[in-house]
Amino acid sequence: MTTSHVILGDGIAGSSAAETIRETDPEADVTVVTEEGEALYNRILIKEFAKGKLPEAPVSIHEPGWYDERDIDLELNTHVTGVDTDDKTVHTYDSGTYEYDKLLVATGGTPLQLPVENADAEGIHHFWTFQDARKIREHAAEAEKGVVIGAGLLGIDLAAICGAQGVDAKYLMRGNRWWRYALSLDGAEIIHRALEEMGVEPVFESGLDHFEADETGHVSGVVDTNGVTHEAEFVGIAVGLDYNTEFLEDTAVEVDDGVLVDQYMGTNVEDVYAAGDITRYYDVILEDRTQNGSWGSAKEQGVVAGKNMATDEATSEFRYVPSYSITHFDFPFLSFGHPTIGKEEAERKYSDDEWRRLTFKNGKLIGGVLIGDLSQQSTFKKIIRQERPVADQKEALLEKEVDLDALAPSPIE
Ligand SMILES: Cc1cc2nc3c(=O)[nH]c(=O)nc-3n(C[C@H](O)[C@H](O)[C@H](O)COP(=O)(O)OP(=O)(O)OC[C@H]3O[C@@H](n4cnc5c(N)ncnc54)[C@H](O)[C@@H]3O)c2cc1C
């Protein structure tokens, strides 16, 4: 009997799952439903496009022909409004109903909108889709003054876009540094200097109170939490994600700030899986539930879900160390594993633009941040994957070159 797989979302998680299902079961029916008007593109590259440095073509990953060749049905411009897990149907806004045997939820997140005065003024940008990038590119090219809000991995993209587009920008941060959950002041200062070099001024102990708009409804300024007004015709804001789970509200699928899944990407409801940014998954290395918003992780979760959906067995397990790099500066930056949730830490500054921080939990290395020198990244990822009990060997881990043989052996290999 043919199995019908319906995949919600054509991001990297949904698309990888569709490809994996097709490779594993040539007979299956595979349908991918997305509310976007274009097939999978590289979300990582849209920032380079918005900087004005890259044309549209290299951002695209799949032409619609890619789906046809694999006999995958791609439904664009189709907004999912509800799921009935008893009837096994998916309801859409105006494109009818889809029946499934197996369902994958891979609908990711939408940037959080802050409910402040003039939040809907023209020129205020959130950043998630290629469409957002097109508008950002156009507005940033015209703007002279800008403000960026959100001291994290997406906020810094908006700051770099301002830098590349010659927008004289202020970057408002809540604490005394950028990405304070993963970096100490020593590490963050390297980033602050690099921002200033590109024409972006960090403003610390600040944040958004409200926006000011002109008579045409265009943003004209940002009033910060200290009452200071920063002139701006361009605003970029990245303060977190709302997970796209509304359509699961009437189901028994467990949702708690994301869809809860096990290490096989299965939810608590039979034949319903989830993958990508939207999941709060059981991490077999952390031995805990966690979340991750990165391309590689979403792709691997899609593959794991696809295999388990197509074989109808929980055989493939998600055991993965994610990473996220920033390429805006003339030094490299990489975060790996889960650098924001460790209970213990160790760090060292090696030079003006070289720094390392490692975090530990239950005696194991679980993540870190490398600035300036990424040469040890595969070593650190290996230590995490192998679950070596190295928390008492911090000095050895902070050596410029880590000697794997000198560290505690892996208990699992
Ligand atoms: C600007 C930017 C830069 C980034 N840079 C990096 C980077 O350098 N490195 C890195 O590792 N990661 C980066 N990321 C994060 C990375 O892109 C994401 O983690 C990854 O794309 C998540 O993939 P996903 O498939 O889970 O979700 P998404 O890519 O968000 O895909 C979900 C899809 O589902 C659709 N959808 C949502 N709701 C519905 C609905 N109700 N009905 C139908 N369709 C729906 C959405 O429109 C979307 O197309 C970046 C993200 C952004 C936005």
Image: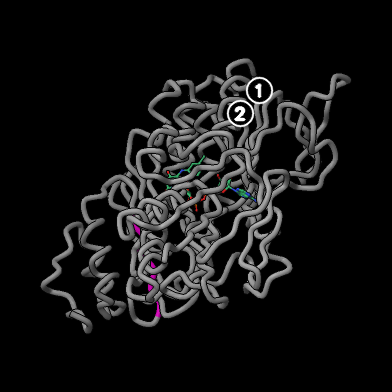
Discs 2, 1 touching: Cβ within 8 Å: yes
Number of marks in the rendered image: 2
- Nearer to the camera, 354 or 322: 322
Residue visible at 77% across and 46% down? 225
When asked about the image quadrant of residue 202, the answer is: top right
Q: Quadrant of the C terminus?
A: bottom left
- Queried whether the magenta region covers residue 358, the answer comes back as yes
Residue visible at 51% across and 27% down? 50
Looking at the rendered structure, the kind of residue marked 1 is Lys
Q: Quadrant of the N terminus?
A: bottom left
Q: Is residue 13 left or right of residue 138?
A: left
- Residues in magenta, as a range: 356-361
Q: Which residue is mark 1?
A: 145
Q: Which residue is mark 2?
A: 169
> What secondary structure is marked by label 2?
strand
Q: Position of residue 368 (x, y in %)?
A: 37, 61
Residue visible at 41% across and 61% down? 301
Q: Residue furthest top?
A: 142
Residue 29 image label:
none
